[in-house]
Image (cartoon, helix red, strand yellow):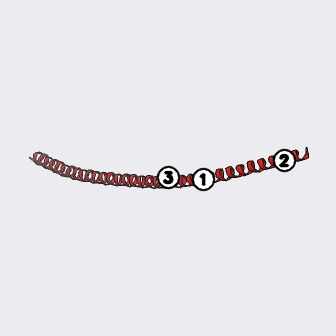
Amino acid sequence: AKQEDSADDAEKELKSKMASEQEAVKGHRAKLATKEEDAADKNWSLEGEVGNKEQQNIKDLEANLSDTKESSERAQAELKEQVSEEKGVAHELRAHLSARARSAKEAVAELEASLKKQEQEAS
């Protein structure tokens, strides 16, 4: 009878230990599930941060592109204005040189006429 009581006690103790270990396993599983949820939340948070950073980078790049485009357009406008001014100066120079060439031709013609007159007078 003592052996049966002892066996019953051992069985009860074993069942008690199994029950407490099952509770411990349940507790560990619950902790693991919580950690997995936390990790998933952190992952979502990180993905959100990465997405926000990517969006900010895109906005920054678009702003830089816009600035570059504006400065390029300003530079083109300045170059067009400069070319226009230089064309005007070139036109003025051509007109001035043309007038000087006419004056020089007239002076040469006058000298030639004067020289012919002198030659005629000399002969």
Left or right of 107 on screen, residue 58? left
* Residue toward you, 108 or 80: 108
Marking on residue 14:
none
* Residue toward you, 60 or 94: 94
Instruction: Specify the farthest residue to the top.
Output: 123
Marking on residue 86:
1
Marking on residue 72:
3
Q: Nearer the viewer, mark 2 or mark 1?
A: 2
| Residue 9 image position (x, y, % from top left) | 13, 50
| Residue 47 image position (x, y, % from top left) | 33, 51
Tag 2's secondary structure? helix
Image quarter of the C terminus: top right
Mark 3 vs 1: CB contact within 8 A: no
Mark 2 vs 3: CB contact within 8 A: no
| Residue 7 image position (x, y, % from top left) | 13, 46
Say whether disc 3 or disc 1 marks the residue closer to the N-terminus.
3
Q: Nearer the viewer, mark 2 or mark 3?
A: 2
| Residue 87 image position (x, y, % from top left) | 59, 51
Say whether disc 2 or disc 1 marks the residue closer to the N-terminus.
1
- Crowding near the residue tagged with mark 3, few <14, some 14–19, many ≥20 C-alpha atoms within 10 Å: few
Marking on residue 117:
2
Instruction: Specify the farthest residue to the left.
Output: 1
Looking at the picture, which amino acid does disc 2 mark? Lys
Left or right of 113 on screen, residue 18? left
Looking at the picture, which amino acid does disc 3 mark? Ser
Say whether disc 2 or disc 3 marks the residue closer to the N-terminus.
3
Disc 2/disc 3 C-alpha distance (Å): 66 Å
Disc 2/disc 1 C-alpha distance (Å): 46 Å
Task: Kindly identify the residue that appears in the image at 18 percent across and 49 percent down.
Answer: 22
* Residue toward you, 74 or 50: 74
Instruction: Specify the farthest residue to the right.
Output: 122
- Crowding near the residue tagged with mark 1, few <14, some 14–19, many ≥20 C-alpha atoms within 10 Å: few
